[in-house]
Image (spheres, rainbow, N blue to C red):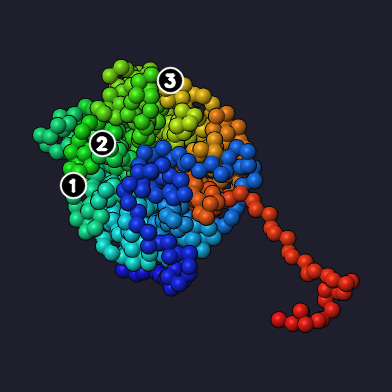
Amino acid sequence: MKLARSLFLLAVLSPGPARLAAQTSAQDIAKPPAANWLSYSGDYSGQRFSSLEQINTHNVANLAPKWVFHVPDSKHLESSPIVVDGIMYVTNSNEVYALDATTGRALWHFKYSLSKISGSNRGAAVLGDRLFFVSSDAHLLALNRKSGSLLWQVRYADSNKGYGATLAPLAIKDKIIVGVSGGDCGIRGYIDAYDATSGKLAWRFWTIPGPGEPGSETWGGQSPEYSGGATWMTGTYDPVEDTVYWAAGNPGPNFYAGARLGDDLYSNSLLALDAATGKRRWHFQFTPHDTHDWDAQEIPVVVDTTFQNSPRKLILHADRNGFFYVLDRNDGHMLLGKPFVKKLTWARGVLPDGRPDKIAGMDATPNGNLVCPGAIGATNWFSPSFNPQTGLFYVMSVERCDVYTSSTAPPPSKKGECYSGTGVDQLPTDPGQFVLRAIDFQTGSIRWEKRLINEFFSGAAMPGTLATAGNLLFFADDSGYLAAADALSGDTLWHFYTGQFIASSPITYSVGGKQFVEITNATDVFSFGLFEPSRPVPQPIVRNGSSPSSGGAADRQ
């Protein structure tokens, strides 16, 4: 284990980082984000809505870069940072940087060098005086937040069997929740909870039921050991009900379904789990028997509000299959299901029981079959946001179709072996179009939409959104611009070119009464604040007509 902490003494001796000693509690994370940004989505709800309003529609045009930090050896940053009392924590593959959030100055750096795998990493979690993140080979690591020193680590999945990890952990009460990647590589997905103090496993929930367990009958006899259901994105949490909401990915093989006849539970599902025990309280499956790789890894947004004239506890979810859902959080019952993209050919709509009204003949064929949405989905893992003041749900959507081609023989069923059993081809005439949409969650109708520039569209750019009390919506496009729009009208009010594609979501925070907006592009961390004109240099006072540079005693220091 190598600790790259050459800047440690700077962190200890500098007056600013003394704030690192502050404890972060679960009660702190439960509060709507303001000065701090304490989890991947800001708080437990996943709303990505900040109460900060110093930067607003009237002055956002004066937003200017305050600092830029280059992450060495980075090529594809996807990190959504944590900010705690003026300290920002940014992750790259197998490493963490602690930065002064007002200047971008590095305070400490930790590198986990034992992993032989390099990949995406989307962020960290904080609880107490500790910081938690995952390595690419699926180790959960706990660091001292003040020094960056390693406290403990636990291997929670075997990378030799196709497992990996890319997500930001979720810290709740005394537990750290993590998931696994590798759903296309012959794994069996699960969600783990670990004791934040000791690293001991508290519970595990398998997303693919074992033989004889409820849901196992939906697989047509296929073994659960290589059936997918990865859990590679961070979930959300209701601290009042003590319930974790976590999405499960596509079944395996991800396109060929000849051996898995049935709904394939709990793939493509939202799972409500008892946070103390990991027991399933309910589930909702968005795409039963998925044959298009539309895993449900989009953030489930927790909202307490009035829905259609009745007080409700809700989950809002824009799914990769092209439909926007409103679910009752008590039991998972669907209250609303409507399309949010125009290119949607596989289903007519959503039936009252929540199941899609499928159109026949939309599976892959040996000669190829054009289906919308494409394999990237109508949206993907990039974060949505919800503004309770406007009642609008903001999501980056994708208008694109793909040609799905099936194989003539079933794929191998070996654990840890990546396979699909079919292929997906993009039409040269349909490169895809990013469209930012504002959805009225009461009706599912599109309030406004904004077509974005498609300069590098290849799936590399995965920008998310951020809503603020300043009536602003921050978002990024496919060409590397960070922008701000009026949250009600969608009118663009400000933009800044970062120079490279953006595969992360913006955040906002405040230090010393000044609000900042952050975005991470492929290799750098940018922080913006309101422009502050330089103070004029004081001029010497001239008395009795004498020259200010006469060389008198006042000039000798």
Q: Is residue 525 left or right of residue 191?
A: right
Residue named by callout 1: 203
Q: Is residue 11 above or below residue 178?
A: below
Q: Is residue 273 left or right of residue 346?
A: left
Q: CA distance from mark 2 to mark 3?
A: 26 Å
In the rendered image, the residue lying farthest to the front is 544
- Residue at point 57%, 36% (across, down): 485
Residue 267: where, in percent of width, then height?
26, 34
Specify which label sits upstream in the sequence, 1 or 2: 1
Label 3 packing within 10 angstroms: few (<14), some (14-19), many (20+): few
CB within 8 Å, label 2 to label 3: no
Q: Is residue 551 above or below residue 494?
A: below
Q: What SS does tag 2 mark?
A: loop
Specify which label sits upstream in the sequence, 1 or 3: 1
Camera sees residue 309 = yes
Residue named by callout 2: 241
In the rendered image, the residue lying farthest to the right is 545
Q: How many marks?
A: 3
Residue named by callout 3: 443
Depth check: 55 or 442 in front? 55
